Amino acid sequence: CGRNKKTIRTNFIRIKIIKSMLLTTEKIIKEWTDYNNHMNLSYYILVFDLGAEVILSKFKMGEQSAKTTKKSTMVVETHTTYNNEVKEGDEVDVFLSHFDHDNKRLHYKLEMYDKNKNVLSATTEVLSLYIDLSIRKVTELEEEKKAIIDEFINQNKSNFKSDNLKFSNKLKK
């Protein structure tokens, strides 16, 4: 009976991680830690941002887009949870666990797991606006980008988690 519980727990963890999309793996460096000997909260956001850049680039909205088309996103609201400590030398995986959009907004949630322990370390839910950087104003997503995003969502929506989302009602669909 004890063995079955371990198997169920192991399978539960494996399923939870597989159901999300891996964006990046980062090793926590000394400069990211604070006097409490764990990662400072500002660096959680940095690590999440490194993961976000991966998905934004896939949608042609990342750094390259900002430089070449003068179109990018700007975060306007976040909700972050800190679930378990991350310390120097730990490796963390950042997964995309939810993604949606309307004509001007992106809504996504990222999860950070301790790579070795398979334990949820932190989450961040993000609401971003699509910006024309040449005039620094919100603008609508181009049809090409909407098509890329919609195809991605359709291919991955069965893997997304929609529980405990704070910003779903902010999309104008």
Image (spheres, rainbow, N blue to C red):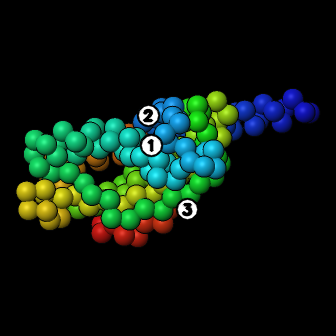
Q: Amino acid at mark 2?
A: Thr
Q: Residues within 10 Å of mark 1 (few under 14, many from 20)?
A: some
State the quadrant of the N terminus.
top right
Q: Earlier in the sequence, mark 2 or mark 3?
A: 2
Q: Earlier in the sequence, mark 3 or mark 1?
A: 1
Distance from disc 3 to disc 1, alpha carbons, whole Å, reads 22 Å
- Residue 9 spot, x, y in % from top left: 75, 37
In the image, which disc is placed on residue 70? none
To which residue does mark 1 refer? 47
Q: Earlier in the sequence, mark 1 or mark 2?
A: 2
- Residue 25 spot, x, y in % from top left: 48, 32
Are the two marked residues, 1 and 2, in contact with CB atoms closer than 8 angstroms? yes
Numbered disc in front, either 2 or 3: 2
SS under mark 3: loop
Question: How many numbered marks have been drawn onto this rendered protein structure?
Answer: 3
Up the image or down, 17 lies above or below 61; here it is: above
